[in-house]
Image (spheres, rainbow, N blue to C red):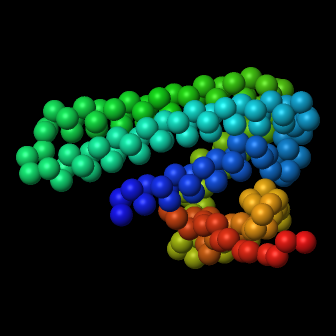
């Protein structure tokens, strides 16, 4: 059961990594006025990060299986458990550090004007919890999903023609409120 859950989680993470790694939303490209050369570089850098994270997450899953196995022992070895938990933390920190390096590398590609626009987005992100509080307490209505939130079928599966539609009942506020709903469409 645990192994099946981990495989499902890795599969979902891999699918989402594909979207991030080789896709840059058009509204972001338009807002930041990203050139084709910048887009190619950003996609390449993100794909490299997703490969790095995938390797680390795979190892993390194996370590978690080892932890689960050790915990089921009649007398779990505290040292063995401690070493595995320490490895999980090391992996988490490696991923975090690589993400920071990736952000720095991508931001180095941007012009001063693009960085100013990115700073505005960062301010919006900083204010999101306050806006979500206002939505949660009905001081304002949730924002509708902007156009372009459908990931084209060929980005998901050229075989099955699935599309993923982000859904949010409260404008993206709160944990777990935005989910991807698979909608299967016939091949053309």
- Viewer-proximal residue among 27 and 91: 91
- Farthest front residue? 159
Q: In which quarter of the image is residue 5?
A: bottom left
- Viewer-proximal residue among 99 and 161: 161
Residue at 84% over, 26% down = 111
Q: As drawn, is 7 to the left or to the right of 47?
A: left
Q: Could you say where residue 156 lies in the image, as x and y percent from the top left?
A: 74, 59
| Image: 188 above or below 2 | below
| Image: 54 above or below 130 | above
Q: Quadrant of residue 123?
A: top right
Residue at 14% over, 50% down = 73
| Image: 106 above or below 70 | above
Q: Could you say where residue 24 lies in the image, as x and y percent from the top left?
A: 79, 46
Q: Could you say where residue 102 lies in the image, as x and y percent from the top left?
A: 64, 29
Instruction: Answer yes or no: is residue 145 visible.
Output: no
- Farthest left residue? 75
Instruction: Answer yes or no: is residue 109 visible.
Output: yes
């Amino acid at each position: 059961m645990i192994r099946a859950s981990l495989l499902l989680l890795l599969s979902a993470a891999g699918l989402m990594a594909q979207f991030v790694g080789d896709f840059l939303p058009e509204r972001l490209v338009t807002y930041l006025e990203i050139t084709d050369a910048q887009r190619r570089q950003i996609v390449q850098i993100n794909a490299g990060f997703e490969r790095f994270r995938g390797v680390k997450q795979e190892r993390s899953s194996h370590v978690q299986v080892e932890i689960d196995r050790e915990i089921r022992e009649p007398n779990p070895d505290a040292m063995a458990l401690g070493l595995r938990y320490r490895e999980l933390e090391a992996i988490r920190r490696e991923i975090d550090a690589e993400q920071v390096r990736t952000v720095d590398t991508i931001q180095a590609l941007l012009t001063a004007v693009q960085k100013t626009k990115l700073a505005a987005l960062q301010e919006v992100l900083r204010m999101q919890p306050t806006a979500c509080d206002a939505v949660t307490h009905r001081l304002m209505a949730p924002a509708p999903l902007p156009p372009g939130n459908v990931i084209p079928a060929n980005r998901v599966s050229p075989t099955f023609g699935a599309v993923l539609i982000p859904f949010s009942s409260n404008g993206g506020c709160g944990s777990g409120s935005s989910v991807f709903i698979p909608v299967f469409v016939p091949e053309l």
